[in-house]
Image: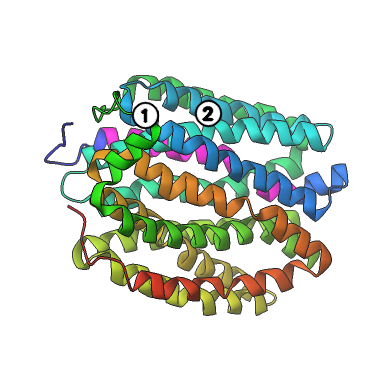
Amino acid sequence: MTRHAKADIRVLFALTLVHFTGDFYSSFTSPLFPLFVEKMGLSLTQVGLIAGVNRFLAFIVQPMAGYYSDRYQTRLFIMTGLLMPVVFIPISGIATGFWTLLLFVALGSVGSSMFHPSVTGMVPLYSGGNAGFSMSVFNTGGTLAFGVGPLFITWYAVRYGLSALPATMVFGLAVLVYLFFAVPRPQSEGMRHLGFFGAVRESLGDAWKSIALIWVVMFLRALVGQSFMTFMPVLYVQKGFSIVSAGVIFSLFTMAGTASGLLAGHISDRIGFKPVFFFSHAAMAPILYLFLKLEGGWVYLGAALAGASVLASLPIGVVMAQTLAPRGRSMVASLMMGFAFGLGGMLSPLVGKLADLTSIQTVLTGITVIPLVTLPIIACFPGIKSR
């Protein structure tokens, strides 16, 4: 394993572009739920099921992709994984019913789950002495994609219709050609002789207890974030906002996370991860509660503040775990992102069912309490900085 003493900007840019492109296409689905509901007559339970399957596949696929990424020096997971959301998410626009829509979204999700562990595991090797900030920049690729993607796709779908979505894959295919030459091969961690669980034990080592605590916090954060991101567009369309306005709200939520993630990464490189975790999660509950109470133009400001609080700790959770377990960078990244993200998102059908029985507003208000539950767990985190 070779770590570069100075940040390799070219490689970090390529890895960030992989993240941006894959998440750009993955971001299309949630903002289009109101149009899919109108076209197919979907219930909120079905909306939650699509979102839940999407997250479930991340839960299943990412740990295995992380396992193989640490064992083999191959770009197969990156290139094939990126190709799938670029192709299948746009094709969802011509889905004729619930099951075909579910299939296309699921195939796109499998691809997204394949490339995330590999590229995330490569970031620390090319970041020099600023792993926290570099991971935040890399994460910015994803959060920025989830910011501009909904703006683009809601405008595009309203103007041209869902049936025109397949034409949007042209951009992604062009980017893939560049990335084929720009992305280096991942570096193996020399664990080919170990099975899956043996590799997990070897990766985590004596740090497994601390990593387990980080994972619980990341899972609960994902549950909150995915619940808001799945049902927020439908909620605000119900409140009288247009499809495009709901897309703007969604974009502000995610794009604010871009800025907060960069700030969190920069600060964590200097004072450590634990204080940043504690502050962002302590602020999350009141900010989300206030967001749901706002009306009119104030909703846009509330969306930005809410997204900043929810997404700030995402990159530093990954880097903290990689700092504690440097031999399993891809595996640890898959646990913090895919496994936590997927398991948290798998509860979307339950959230949707509760919303069918009560209302989206009521369920999301209840979810705002969850960040407070993470505070005693964060208090048990080790006080470390990125290496």
Q: Amino acid at mark 1?
A: Gly
In this view, the residue in front, 98 or 22, is 98
Q: Which residue carries the number 1 mark?
A: 195
Membership of 26 in magenta stretch: yes
- Magenta stretch, main secondary structure, is helix
| Label number found at residue 180 | none
Of badges 1 and 2, nearer the viewer stands 1
360 in relation to 29, above or below: below
Dot 1 or dot 2: first in sequence order is: 2
Number of labelled discs?
2
Seen at 15% across and 37% down, the residue is 4
Q: Which residue carries the number 2 mark?
A: 172
Q: Amino acid at mark 2?
A: Gly
Residue 157 location (% of width, % of height): 73, 41
In this view, the residue in front, 286 or 177, is 286
Residue 108 location (% of width, % of height): 60, 32
Along the horizontal axis of the image, is 305 left or right of 360? left
Seen at 29% across and 36% down, the residue is 122
Whether residue 237 appears in this view of the structure is no
Residue 71 location (% of width, % of height): 32, 26
In this view, the residue in front, 160 or 262, is 262
Seen at 50% across and 71% down, the residue is 371
304 in relation to 114, above or below: below
Q: Secondary structure at mark 1?
A: loop
Q: Secondary structure at mark 2?
A: helix
Whether residue 291 appears in this view of the structure is yes
Residue 354 location (% of width, % of height): 76, 64
Q: Which quarter of the picture shows residue 203?
A: top left
Seen at 54% across and 71% down, the residue is 370
Where are the magenta residues, as a range?
Answer: 11-33
